[in-house]
Amino acid sequence: MIILYGIANCDTIKKTRNWLDTARVAYQFHDYRKDGSPETLIRKFAQAFDYHELVNTRGTTWRKLPESARRDLDQAAAIALMCAQPALIKRPLLQSGNNWLLGYDEARLRDFVTGD
């Protein structure tokens, strides 16, 4: 079973969900705002990806952070920030067993769901 992690009102999540639905791929959606973003989950992400990859530095949540938080970011600080503000987690993030995919790319998404 594929798990799609994200925020329901995110345009990239909507695009990913639409792609999965159109391709008739079964998945479970984990909404950070409704289902939470506990530290254990974020640490699981950090085992699959470097924290630099996980932190969405393009969004308004990142830009609203104090300069000191952005400048002094290390793994512990990144995990704490992503727990407190899940909009900082790059989207989409998909998991299928031990396989992970971060970011929207149709070719990579197609390979991910087919197991290629």
Image (cartoon, helix red, strand yellow):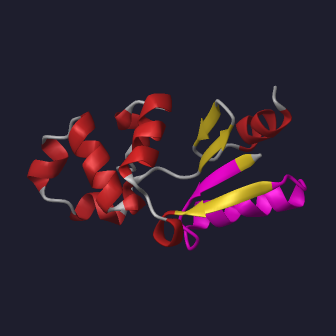
Q: Nearer the viewer, residue 97 or 61?
A: 97
Magenta stretch encompasses residue 42: no
Q: Is residue 61 left or right of residue 27?
A: left
The structure residue drawn at horizontal position 69% and vertical position 62%, both measured from the top left corner, is 15
Vertical position of residue 102 compared to residue 63: above or below: above
Q: Residue 40: name its quadrant.
A: top left
Q: Is residue 93 left or right of residue 39?
A: right
Q: Nearer the viewer, residue 45 or 91?
A: 45
Q: Residue 64 appears at what percent x and percent y?
A: 23, 65
Q: Nearer the viewer, residue 114 or 39?
A: 39
Magenta-highlighted residues = 3-26
Q: Residue 38: name its quadrant.
A: bottom left
Magenta stretch encompasses residue 12: yes
Q: Residue 99 appears at what percent x and percent y?
A: 66, 31
Q: Point out the image quarter for the C terminus.
A: top right
Vertical position of residue 3 compared to residue 60: above or below: above
Q: Is residue 13 left or right of residue 54?
A: right
Q: Residue 60 appears at what percent x and percent y?
A: 33, 65
